Image: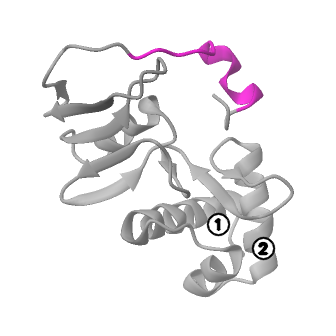
Amino acid sequence: MPETSEALDGRVRLTVFERLLETGQAPSFEEAARALGVDPEKIAVSYQRLAGQHRLVLKPGTTEILMANPLSAVPTAFTVEVRGRSHFGNCIWDSLGVIAMLGNSGRVLTSCGDGCGEAMTVRIEHGVPVDGRGIIHFQVPRARWWDDIVFT
């Protein structure tokens, strides 16, 4: 019985997450195809389908992965340290999501978002902020995030 597109998309997404967590790099659709033993064109279509479902964000006009929320495939101003490894979050919200995804303890290294540029660290232990000082500001209302998810 042929694999459904939904089943393939699940395997593709898992492959993307595993590669991002292992290497910090998102696999090209050709690399994902090799890893999964699937025709590259099917993986390219899967990447597009996953992007349409807001499960991946592709670089405009390409099949290159920019984001697999909450992980970023490119360096950002949000370095997330969990279990002795570093990853990039797309924003503070996603960075906290990386910590939640990987065990509820870690820290986010970033800078003050109000323009002062002061270094900031947000520490989470067992799902609880260690130091309750600080503010997380969302410039765009949640309902509008996908209007321009890269800016948001």
Name the residue rendered at 34%, 28% in the picture.
118
For marks 2 and 1, the one nearer the N-term is 1
Name the residue furthest right. 61
Q: Is residue 1 visible?
A: no
Percent from the top left, x then y, of residue 113?
46, 23
Q: Is residue 6 visible?
A: yes
Question: Mark 2 Cα within 10 Å, few/some/many (few <14, many 20+)?
Answer: some
| Residue bearing the label numbered 2 | 42
Percent from the top left, x then y, of residue 11?
56, 66
Alpha carbon separation for disc pair 2 and 1: 9 Å
**Under tag 1, what secondary structure?**
helix
Name the residue rendered at 58%, 81% in the picture.
36
Amino acid type for the residue under numbered disc 2: Lys
- Snapshot quadrant of residue 52: top right
| Residue bearing the label numbered 1 | 8
Is residue 144 found left or right of 105 in the rendered image?
right
**Under tag 2, what secondary structure?**
helix
